[in-house]
Amino acid sequence: MELIRSFSVDHTRIIPGIFTSRVDHLGEYLVTTYDVRLKRPNREPVLDVAAMHSLEHLVATYLRNDPARKDEVIYWGPMGCLTGFYLILKGSRAPQEIYDLILGAFRSVEEAKEVPGTAPENCGYYRMHNLDMAKWYAREFATYLAANAQNPEIFFYPETARPVTGGGQDFYDS
């Protein structure tokens, strides 16, 4: 079985940033999944679940209301490992091309007075939100992105090589 791309990323070397996870051709459409990584996997504590839930609501609302990109947004949601989010957009562009959009989204969290969509009718677990912690994480990530805008490592995955057997097959496929 082929190892999926996200498992080919060296999680011991990845740093926070915006990365292209995959580009898919879905019929006549091209869609890109971006990895918006806030924490270093296996080296930093993961995001607080309630704060992550609030960031999901806040950033999704921002993205789906951005005049230039709202029609391109397919999905914004948390990673299972709680170190970041996935953003799926129509089309394909380099992570550097969505840098301003992501930076603006995280900076917008600081201005939030409440988390949108948190009534029982609107949210699957409306009691699990933490706006103050969401603001803290958003400020931390936005500051980091701004300080590292010229650092190419925040835009390119560190790849990991798959072991190869003596017969030339990928180890996991042999």
Image (spheres, rainbow, N blue to C red):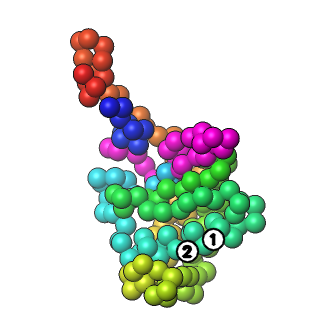
Spot occupied by residue 101 in the image (x, y as percentages of width and height): 65, 60
Q: CA distance from mark 2 to mark 1?
A: 6 Å
Mark linked to residue 62: 1
| Apparent side of residue 162 relative to residue 5 in the rendered image (left or right) | left
Verify whether residue 20 appears in magenta. Answer: yes
Spot occupied by residue 80 in the image (x, y as percentages of width and height): 36, 59
Dominant secondary structure of the residues highlighted in magenta in the image:
strand
Query: For the view shown, which residue lies furthest in the top direction?
Result: 167
Q: Disc 2, disc 1: CB below 8 Å?
A: yes
| Apparent side of residue 116 relative to residue 42 in the rendered image (left or right) | right
Tell me the magenta residue range. 11-34
> Quarter of the image holding residue 92?
top right
Q: Quadrant of the C terminus?
A: top left
Please name the residue shown 61% across and 62% down the image: 103
Q: Which residue is mark 2?
A: 58
Q: Dot 2: within a 10 Å radius of its alpha carbon, few (fewer than 14), some, or many (20 or more) residues?
A: many
Q: Secondary structure at mark 1?
A: helix
> Quarter of the image holding residue 70?
bottom right
Please name the residue shown 51% across and 82% down the image: 122
Q: Is residue 53 above or below residue 151?
A: below
Query: For the view shown, which residue lies furthest in the right direction?
Result: 67
Give 112 or 79, whichever is nearer the viewer. 79
Residue type marked 1 = Tyr
Give 166 or 156, whichever is nearer the viewer. 166
Residue type marked 2 = Leu
Please name the residue shown 63% across and 71% down the image: 62
Query: For the view shown, which residue lies furthest in the front direction?
Result: 27
Please name the residue shown 61% across and 80% down the image: 111
- Residue 31 in view: yes
- Residue 152 in view: no
Q: Secondary structure at mark 2?
A: helix
